[in-house]
Image (cartoon, rainbow, N blue to C red):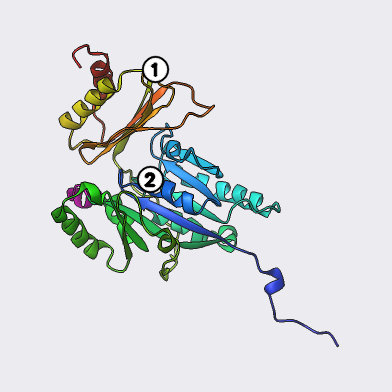
Amino acid sequence: MKNYSLSSSANAIERIPVFIISGFLGSGKTTLLNRLLSHAPKSAVIINEFGTTPIDQQLLREHKVPLSTLVGGCLCCQVRGSLTPLLKNLRMAWDSGDKPFERVIIETSGVANPEPVLDILLRERWIAKRYSLQGVITTVSAVMDEDHFDYFPEAQAACAWADMVVMTQTDLATDQQIERISARLDQLAPAATRLTAVQGELDHSALLNFPKKFRRLRDTELPDLPDHGFSSIALQLEHPLPWERIQKALEYLIVHYPKQLIRLKGMVYTPGQNQPLLVQGAAGRLYPATRLPVRTSDDGIGRLVIITQGGVKDLAEELMAQLRSNNL
C-alpha cells in the first residue's frame, strides 16, 4: 500500500517580505527610507525616480545595501515593465544561498499611483509565490499645499492605498497646518495606521509591524493609466559654484513659478569643498542644504532635477541665466 502525504510544506516556497513607500513629491519618502535602513540594514532597495537623473540614492550613500534605481518615468506607467525582471533578479540572488537581505523596500516616485505596483506583487503568479506584500507606507508632508490633494489624483491615490500614513516635516508646520492635513487624511485614509515623524525620527519597529489590509484582486488586467502631466528637467553644473549663488537662483524659481514648480532636488559642488551639497525643495520652500560624505564614485559634476506641472518654457535657460548672473 502506498502512503500519500497531504502536507505541502516540503514544497513550500519561502516568501520575501516587501514594503512599498509611497507619497507625493517632497513628502520625505527617501528621508524616511534613510532612517529606516539604519534600523533594518538587511534590506534590498528599489528606488523609482521620475526624472532621468537619479538623485534620491545620494541620501542612501552611507548604507551598504543592494540598491537598484529605475529612472525616466513612473513604476505605474513608463517603467512599470522593468519591475518584474528586477524582482526576479533579486530573488535569484536571494536563492543563491547566502540570502543577502531579509526584505525588499520599494520607493515609488513622487508622482506614482501605487496600484500598478500592488498589481504586480499580487497578480503575477511567479512574483506572488516568492514575495509577500506587507503593506504600503505613505508619507504626507505637514506643510503640503492642501490644494495638491484636489489638483493631483496621484496625491490622493497614495493615501487611498496606504496601510500606514506617516506625517512628516511636522517641525516645519504650524498646529493649524497639522490639523488641516490630519482632517484630509481622515477623509482619504480613514483605515490607515498613523505615525508622526518628529524631525525625521519615529518608532521604526511600528513602521515595519502594522496590520495588513485585505486586498481584493482585480478580475481584469489593470488598464494603462493616463499621462501624469508632469515634466522633468535635468541640469548639469560642470564647475563648482558658490552656494549663495545657487541658493538665490533656486529661490528665484520658487518665487516666480509657485504653482508650476512642484519639486526640485540635486547634488551640487561648491569651491574648496570635496563634499557635495544635497539640495531639496518643495511646497514653495527651499530646505537647508546638507553636506554628504565623499565617495570614490563622485565625479565633481553638480546635478539638478526640477519637476513641474506641465512644461514651463525656457525654465532651464532661465535658471542657467540666474546662475551666470553677476548680480546674485
Report the quarter where the C terminus lies.
Answer: top left
Taking the view exactly as shown, the residue that stands out farthest to the front is: 272
Please state which amino acid type lies under the numbered disc 1: Gly
Residue under the point 26% across and 20% down: 245
Taking the view exactly as shown, the residue that stands out farthest to the top is: 326
* Stretch in magenta: 143-152
Taking the view exactly as shown, the residue that stands out farthest to the bottom is: 1
User: Camera-side residue: 301 or 312?
Assistant: 301
Residue under the point 33% across and 66% down: 192
Cα separation, mark 1 vs mark 2, equals 27 Å
- Give the image location of residue 118, x and y in percent: 45, 58
Residue under the point 38% across and 60% down: 203
Residue linked to disc 1? 272
Left or right of 7 on screen, residue 140: left
**Which is more foreground, mark 1 or mark 2?**
1
Quick one: label 1, few (<14), some, or many (20+) residues within 10 Å? few
- Give the image location of residue 226, x and y in percent: 33, 47
Mark nearer the N terminus (1 vs 2): 2
User: Camera-side residue: 194 or 85?
Assistant: 194
- Give the image location of residue 108, x and y in percent: 41, 48
Identify the disc placed on residue 220: none
Q: Is residue 148 magenta?
A: yes
Q: Secondary structure at mark 1?
A: loop
Please state which amino acid type lies under the numbered disc 2: Thr
Residue linked to disc 2? 31
Residue 273 versus residue 63 in the image, above or below: above
Q: Is residue 303 magenta?
A: no
